[in-house]
Structures are given as C-alpha cells and as structure tokens.
Image (tube, coloured by chain):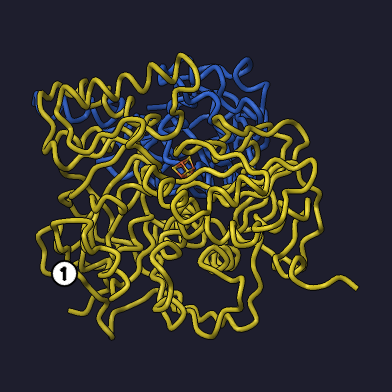
Chain colours: A yellow, B blue
Amino acid sequence: MSMTITEKILAVHSGKVSVVPGELIKVNVDIALANDITAPLAIRVFDEMGVKTVFDQEKIALVPDHFVPNKDIPSARQAKIVREFARRHNIKHYFELGDVGIEHVILPEKGIVVPGDLIIGADSHTCTYGALGAFSAGVGSTDLGVIMATGQTWLKVPATIKLVFEGTPSRWVCGKDLILYSIGLLGVEGANYKTLEFSGEVIKNLSMAQRLTMANMAVEAGAKNGIFEPDEITRAYMENRSSMQGSFLESDPDAEYEKVININVDQMEPQVALPHSPDNVYPVSEVDPVVLDQVFIGSCTNGRTEDLQIAADILKGRSVAHGVRLIVIPGSPHIYKESIKNGTIETLLDAGAVIGPPCCGPCLGGHMGVLAEGEKAVSTTNRNFIGRMGHPKSDVFLASPAIAAASAVLGRIGSPDELLQPKF
Amino acid sequence: MKIEGRAWKFGDHVDTDLIIPARFLNVSDKDELAKNCFADLRPDFVKGVRPGDVIIAGSNFGCGSSREHAPWAIKAAGIKVIVAKSFARIFYRNAFNIGLAILESEEAVDMLSDGDQVSADLSSGKLQALKSGRHFSAKPIPAFMREIIEAGGLINYVKLKKAA
Ligand code: SF4
C-alpha cells in the first residue's frame, strides 16, 4: 500500500505493515524529551505511577533551557528537580549550563535525533525534527511521564497536507518567510491534527537550518508534525553527528494526501506576522513602519549559526538605531563558538547588540528581555500571542533574521533593501 | 457525572499563554497555577469561579504551547468541563489525561452567553441552559476517554486498571 513518509515512520514504530489516517496506534518512542518547565510535572507523574526505572536511560532527553541560568528561586527549584531525577536515573542526554542550549537546537546538533526516528516531547515545538525526516510531535507532561516509564504512547495517524514550493525565491526570502506565508494561508488551526509535508524545487535547495525553522513552526498552523523527505542535504548534515545512520524514507509517488497546495515563490516578499497571531501575515512592504523598542534574534526557530550570520551580514558596518535594544541569543554553546570564530559575534557587538547565554530567553517572556507595557518588538521567534514576550499590552511582530536585523538598524519595521538602496 | 454552574464565555483561539502566562510557569503546584488562571485575559475569573462552573469557548481552544499547566490551572480553579467549538490537539489530549472533561458543540457555544446558568451531563454530552430550558448536544466522549475522566485522569486510570 502506498504511504506518505509520516505514515511509513508510524507504521514502522507500531510494528505494522501499513497505517491509514485516522487509525489509533500504539507506538514505540525513540526519544522522549522534556524541559525545565514540563519535566517536573512529568517526573511527578512518573513517581505517582510507582515505577522504579525509566524505560531506557539512553532514550530520554532532559534539557533545561527555558528559565536557565535560573532566573529566580522557584525556577531554580524546578531545575533542581530535573537534575536530581537525571542523576537518579542516569539519564544520558541531560545537559548542564555550558553544554546546554535550546532543546530543539541541540538535539539535531548533537545527533541525538536521526532521520526516521519517532520523537515525542513535552514541548509543542518538538515538531522541529521533521526537518531531518523524522516524525516528532509535542504532548503534555502526563503523556511524557507515561512514556518515560513505558517507552510507548498512543497516536492517531494524521492525514497529510502537502505544500509544494516552486519558483525562485528573491534575495531576502528564506525558510522563515515560506513558513509564515504558509501559516497565513492555512490559518492557526488549518492543519489541526494533521501533518504538513514540505516539498518542491525550493525545498530541495533549502539548507538544514532553514528546514529546521520551517518544521519548527508547523505547530503554529495546528499541525501534529511537519516533515521533509531526507536527502543529500540531510546526509551531509548528519555526517559526524551520530553513530546511527537513521532511515531515509520517502513518500510513495502515489501516496494519498488530504490536500496538495502549490505555492509559487517568484513574487514572494519577506513576510511579517503582526500581533497577536502567527497567521496574521503580510508582505513586509505592506506593514506600517512601526517604531520599535526591541529586536530579538534567537530561539529554536532562528537561533542557529546561519541565522546569526545573515543578521551580521546586514549589521556589518551599521549601528542599531538609537532607542532600540537588539538582543541576540545563540541557540547552543556550539553555535556561540562558531559565531565567535566566524566573526559574527564581534560584528553584532560592534553594531550595538547584546549577546545572551544559550537559552530560550525572551521568546516566552521569561527573562533576558521582557517587554514593558506598550512596547513593540520584532522577533525571530514563533509566537506573538497576547503577552507572549511580556506585558499583555506589548506587541510582537514575527519575522526572519534578515528583517529583524534591518529593522534594528532602521528603528522601525523594514527590509534590508531599504538599507542597501541609496535614498533619493 | 452531572454538573451545574455559570458559564464563563471566551472567544476563538484562546491560547495557552492566555490561560496561564509563562511568567507563572516557574512553579508546578496546581493551586499556585490556579491563582493565575486567565490572569491577563480575565482578571475576574479566579475570584469569581465556583465549583461546577463551565467554560464556553470558540474554536481552537488551548492552542499554542504544550504546557499541561494550562488545563491544570483551569481544573484546579474549579472547572470540570470546557465546551468549545474545537480544541487544539495537544490541549485536547492533556485535558483528558488530567481528568478535565471537554465537549465540542458549535450550537451550545453560539447560543450560550457569559453568566448563563448551565448544566452538563458528561456521560451523554447533553447540555442545558437553565433559564431558557434549551437543550444542546455535544459530540459524545468516547467510552475509553470517559473512563479516564471518571477515574480522575490517566494516572489513576492506569492504576485502577492495574489493580483490577
Ligand atoms: S525558544 Fe521559545 S519556542 Fe523554542 S523551546 Fe524555547 S520557549 Fe519554546
């Protein structure tokens, strides 16, 4: 029977020859993930179940990234619960400061997830690993606690919506713009309970960093997972990262899709999601030149080496506008080091940016850049809900690192083209 | 299981940041979480909510993050059932797992207003507006999920099954 890549991965992990959308299946989990916010609840569930040992100490990843370095006493207590659990159960993939970065950045980076895997995480952006050709989805802490004990969970096989990107993207259009455009098209619940499969000419040439950005935001359209067929770019990315090869699966040519949407990118401009919803998307030229207080470049969406480099290329020899705070947070210590070596960090500092330690930072209004009442920010993150980055009366505009960097210089929302073109 | 109380009405796309803003996520104690439920969206909620009250909401309720703190905050505040036009995937799963019932009914959401007295029968999915006497029916909850709710959540359910 012909299947999509998502159906193939689910079939393998449920011990079946084939699965169909709507079917309820019990699956074996390759990696179970939780962070400093969701793990303490999952650990409580695990302990309440009266289980003595985890299902596999090598298949659990505990990543304290949201409120670290500990922002206050209660969050220090949460981090301690995770640390003690990790020690007690000898969890292999537990990371401390200095080694820790944002969960969805370090799991692919350290080769903990590989193509064909099934990954379940107590974090909605677990869908990021679809970039590698894995099935990954977010759940809550109770589900995760049960998985830590049993290694299994139940899932409903999602129907797939295929997005086919064709054409030639213009200079500043990147993965972030493709996914923002798609979310604008589908709406925030347009893919609820479904899979998004990204394909087409444009996708074949997309770097892994950009694929990770796109898969990361699949959940913003309500999707269970967002997936790419692994290819040579995936193979090159995986090299020297993991001893496991993974399985490189593809959708069958006659696989059934619920919908196929063709998107031509020829005329596409960089996209911006206006407050307060990731589907409130407009081309940058149609966005009012809102005056900004803050620009944030980072997060599991756009905190990778390539993202920081794009921003630095635009900021080189320029300065952040007076009155704007530019906060940059590399997604992992490895990215931090790479960005020091390639000169990115120095360029950013010269332009007037402040660099934070690898963590989620202001993405969820936790710390290191919380917005005050009435403040406006451009952010490379994934959500601009009311109060997401601070005060309920602050505004967040979602965009790519290129738009964020240009806006930081302009002091208002704008495109890099405005910096490069001579003014008449 | 039958409950009765006032309706708290919300719009579409109530996300988990609105249910419990991230600045309150540095704890996992349920009663602490309940104190800040809808802190920004409806500051009157925590003071006014009584056991038996019902949340009535539009589509895509609970979208956003996977934080189970969101259904926990709602449950610990005294709510036993949420009726919405539709729910976001992870929230739907989390609610059942922790023993918070959720029902889907477009009609009930359209016809009920904030402050209305309502009764809800979780087993049959029947709702009633007490003043007008109007009945609405929600999609029935699958038997296996009803058992989870009646047990008080997935953990108790698993324990009960093991003991049986
Ligand atoms: S960077 Fe933001 S979206 Fe990503 S895991 Fe952290 S808080 Fe969540």
The amino acid pointed to by label 1 is Ser
Identify the residue position indicated by label 1 in the image: A18
Please name the residue shown 41% across and 69% down the image: A207
- Label 1 marks a residue whose chain is A
Tell me which residue sits at (37%, 27%) in the image.
B1
**Nearest to the observer: residue B59 or residue B81:** B59
* Residue at point 49%, 26% (across, down): B74
**Which quadrant of the figure has residue B132?**
top right
Q: Is residue A23 above or below residue A349?
A: below
Whole-percent x, y for residue A288 in the image? 81, 59
Relative side of A299 to B90, left or right: right
Give the residue displayed 51% in from the left and 62% down from the top. A190
Instruction: State whether residue A349 is above or below residue A236.
Output: above
Secondary structure, mark 1, is loop
Quadrant location of the N terminus of chain A in the rendered image:
bottom left
Q: Quadrant of the C terminus of chain A?
A: bottom right
Rendered view: A51 above or below A226: above
